[in-house]
Amino acid sequence: MKKIIGFISFFVAIGMLIMMVTHNRLVGLIIIALLLFVGYNCFCGD
């Protein structure tokens, strides 16, 4: 469980950092969708 929480918090922090750099809402939504897809594949994939 600690591993999952750490992984999630790491990607949330990366997402927040990228949103500080890019103030474009569309880019932020694309990044959020990409990170959700990566997280889902890592923990629910084969």
Image (spheres, helix red, strand yellow):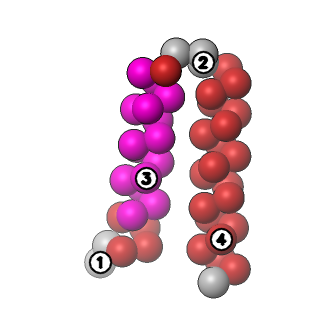
Q: Is residue 34 left or right of residue 1?
A: left
Q: Which residues are magenta?
A: 26-40
Q: Earlier in the sequence, mark 1 or mark 4?
A: 4
Q: Earlier in the sequence, mark 2 or mark 3?
A: 2
- Mark 4, residue position: 5
Q: Quadrant of the N terminus?
A: bottom right
Type of the residue with mark 3: Leu
Q: Earlier in the sequence, mark 4 or mark 2?
A: 4
**Residue 18 percent across, percent down from the top left:** 63, 30
Residue 30 picture quarter: top left
Q: Are marks 1 and 3 in contact (CB under 8 Å)?
A: no
- Mark 1, residue position: 46
Above or below for 18 versus 9: above
Residue 5 picture quarter: bottom right
Which class describes the residues within 10 Å of circle 3: few (<14), some (14-19), or many (20+)?
Answer: some
Classify mark 1: helix, strand or loop.
loop
Of all residues shown, which one is farthest toward the front? 25
Q: Earlier in the sequence, mark 1 or mark 2?
A: 2
